[in-house]
Image (cartoon, rainbow, N blue to C red):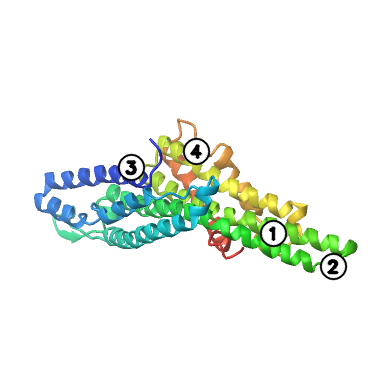
Amino acid sequence: MPYTFAKSWGDTYNKANVVFSKDINTANKTDRKLGGVLKTLLEDANRPLGFISALDVLDKQDLFAGNAKAEAELPAKIKSFKAALDKVEAEKKKYVKVLDDAIKLKPTIKDKNGYDLPTPIKDAYPDTYRQLKIMQTEVEAVFQRASNLLTDALNHAKVAKIQAEKNKAMEKAPKGEEGNAAVKAISNEAVLKTALLKFAPSFKSAMAKGAGVIQKIKASPNVATYNAEMNNGGRDISQNLLNLVKIKADAKFKGTTLAKKLPDPGQMARDIIPFANGDKRNLPLTATEREVKQALTEFTVLYKQIATSYADVISGKIK
């Protein structure tokens, strides 16, 4: 079955729904009133109808530009896709608030002495809490993947603009040997600008996936979950850092103004290798929960460091 945004989100929602139902049923067994309260509290989080409907509309959009006819139709397709994506974003914002509110819930439950006390959902129902966190990251990840499609389509026009600016600058370049060096620098800057158009959304998508990996492993800190999620999570981020290393080292780009703005991955690029292609991408099947949590902690610290260092690259500020 081909990838659709609605199905991708539906897979996450279905898993969460199973956990919600399990916690509600468990609460019902000890206190039917509490089970009913929990069900009511989670009702909005459990009914993302607006978000799903918006994704269904988005799945019907088409940004294909593989032939002359499709290329000519692209501006209208972009307009239609953007309208659908704006609706997804509006529904996403509403649903993220619903999830935020659910995460802050404090259902009243009896403590060990029989007293009714408001208890953070994180402590009262940790499995439900973790699924809410996963849903938060997956909502963002699905939206980011859709945004990347729009960005790629819009980049057609941006590439043409970069090319036009390059041609204009080259016309003004001096003649002779000095001009040759200037033309080379102008050309290299244009090549790097074009590369960064695709790089920024790719990096952003990899980081969104990484955030989801962290939440999913936190929810089930066992070796099977860790290996299934980390298999691609660390690798995708590593690949983007590696591309930055190559850009910074490439003689063509080294002297450009743009390349100088890019932070050097340095130690971060080396530290993530074990999670991308080394012994922390897949832990031994005998790994304990403690070992899984330790590896996840290391990845989380590194993830936050990368996110902070490359915030301007990921956001597209550096271009």
Closer to the camera, 176 or 304? Answer: 176
In percent of the image, x 77 and y 60: which residue is there?
185
Look at mark 4 in the image and give the residue it sits on.
231
Please state which amino acid type lies under the numbered disc 2: Pro
Q: Are marks 1 and 2 in contact (CB under 8 Å)?
A: no
Find residue 11 and name its label: 3
Left or right for 212, reference 21: right
**Disc 3 vs disc 4: which is toward the camera?**
3
Q: Earlier in the sequence, mark 1 or mark 4?
A: 1
Find residue 174 and name its label: 2
- Residue 189 versus residue 18 in the image, above or below: below
Q: Earlier in the sequence, mark 3 or mark 4?
A: 3
3D distance between C-alphas at marks 3 and 2: 59 Å
**Disc 3 vs disc 2: which is toward the camera?**
2
Task: Specify the farthest residue to the right.
Answer: 176
Q: Is residue 204 visible?
A: no
In percent of the image, x 15 and y 59: which residue is there?
116
Q: Are marks 4 and 2 in contact (CB under 8 Å)?
A: no
Please state which amino acid type lies under the numbered disc 3: Asp
Left or right for 309, reference 103: right
Few, some or many residues within 10 Å of mark 2 (<14, 14–19, 20+):
few
3D distance between C-alphas at marks 4 and 2: 52 Å
Give SS at disc 4: helix
Look at mark 1 in the image and give the residue it sits on.
190
Please state which amino acid type lies under the numbered disc 4: Asn
Few, some or many residues within 10 Å of mark 3 (<14, 14–19, 20+):
few
Task: Specify the farthest residue to the left.
Answer: 32
Give SS at disc 2: loop
